[in-house]
Image (cartoon, rainbow, N blue to C red):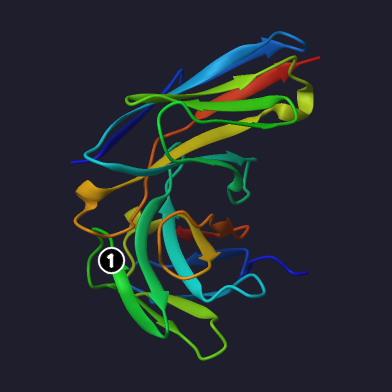
């Protein structure tokens, strides 16, 4: 069974204090790994898709990287508006040919001014 | 350009009742997926519709059913509601049900079963 584990569950940072969120996965044949941002009571907002180990993508203060076992979401000099829950999801060939994504539980990030 | 829209935003139902949730996909998208998100959990895939047919289904009972219309909008129906069905129901749209396509989510419908 595909598994996606995100850590830490919660993270509190001071404004400007850089850090990283982790998404580790156990799947057979990764098709794609997705990062989403979710604000309270809202739907997830797409951030990145990564397809292969070594790939990196950046958007403003966020940078996502991928290895064969995990992905990191690096947040550089965060601002209070970066506070949200960050979700990781994977699609894998072990899903029996389907494209059903498996989501992690997310990391709740709070950035204090 | 309107993104994914869902209605209603909030709903309170009694155990045993039936509910219908609605979703209009992002302009240009033809594939709609439904997810259930319990508090503190990640979204769980319910099913996906493409060309008015259910293409993929997650591990949900037959009480959960859906429909897609010719204009690509979709409905999620849940029969015989249980207290455990209380959750945020999310609709996501994308271009064709293939890999490597980013999904855009709606704001969700918060369903409370009492």
Q: Chain of mark 1?
A: B
Asked if residue A35 is positioned above or below residue B77 in the image, the reply reads above
- The reply to whether residue A49 is in sight is yes
> Going 40% across and 29% down the picture, which residue do you hit?
A53
Left or right placement of residue A109 versus residue B21 in this view: right
Q: Quadrant of residue B55?
A: bottom left
Closer to the camera in the image, A28 or B84: A28
Q: Quadrant of residue A108?
A: top right
How many discs mark residues in the rendered view? 1
Q: Quadrant of residue A83?
A: top right
> Going 25% across and 41% down the picture, which residue do you hit?
A29
Q: Quadrant of the N terminus of chain B?
A: bottom right
Asked if residue A103 is positioned above or below residue B104 in the image, the reply reads above
Q: Quadrant of the C terminus of chain B?
A: bottom left
Left or right placement of residue B105 versus residue B96 in this view: right
- Extreme residue toward the bottom, this view: B70
> Going 38% across and 69% down the picture, which residue do you hit?
B48
- The reply to whether residue B114 is in sight is no
Element marked by disc 1: strand
- Extreme residue toward the right, this view: A113
- Neighbours of disc 1 within 10 Å: few (<14), some (14-19), many (20+): some
Rendered location of residue A57, percent (x, y)? 60, 32
């Amino acid at each position: 069974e595909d598994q996606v584990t995100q850590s830490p569950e919660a993270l509190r940072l001071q404004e400007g204090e850089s850090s990283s969120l982790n998404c580790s996965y156990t799947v057979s044949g990764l098709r794609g790994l997705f990062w989403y941002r979710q604000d309270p009571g809202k739907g997830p907002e797409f951030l990145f898709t990564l397809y292969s180990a070594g790939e990196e993508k950046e958007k403003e203060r966020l940078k996502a990287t991928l290895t064969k076992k995990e992905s990191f979401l690096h947040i550089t000099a965060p601002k209070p508006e970066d506070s949200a829950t960050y979700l990781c999801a994977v699609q894998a060939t072990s899903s029996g040919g389907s494209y059903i994504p498996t989501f992690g539980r997310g990391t709740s990030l709070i950035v204090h001014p | 350009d309107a993104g994914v829209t869902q209605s209603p935003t909030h709903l309170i139902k009694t155990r045993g009742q039936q509910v219908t949730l609605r979703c209009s996909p992002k302009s240009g998208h033809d594939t709609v997926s439904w997810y259930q998100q319990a508090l503190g959990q990640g979204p769980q895939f319910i099913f996906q519709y493409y060309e008015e047919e259910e293409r993929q289904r997650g591990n949900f009972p037959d009480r959960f059913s859906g429909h897609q219309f010719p204009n690509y909008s979709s409905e999620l129906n849940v029969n015989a509601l249980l207290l455990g069905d209380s959750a945020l129901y999310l609709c996501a749209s994308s271009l064709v049900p293939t890999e490597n396509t980013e999904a855009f989510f709606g704001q969700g419908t918060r369903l409370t079963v009492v």
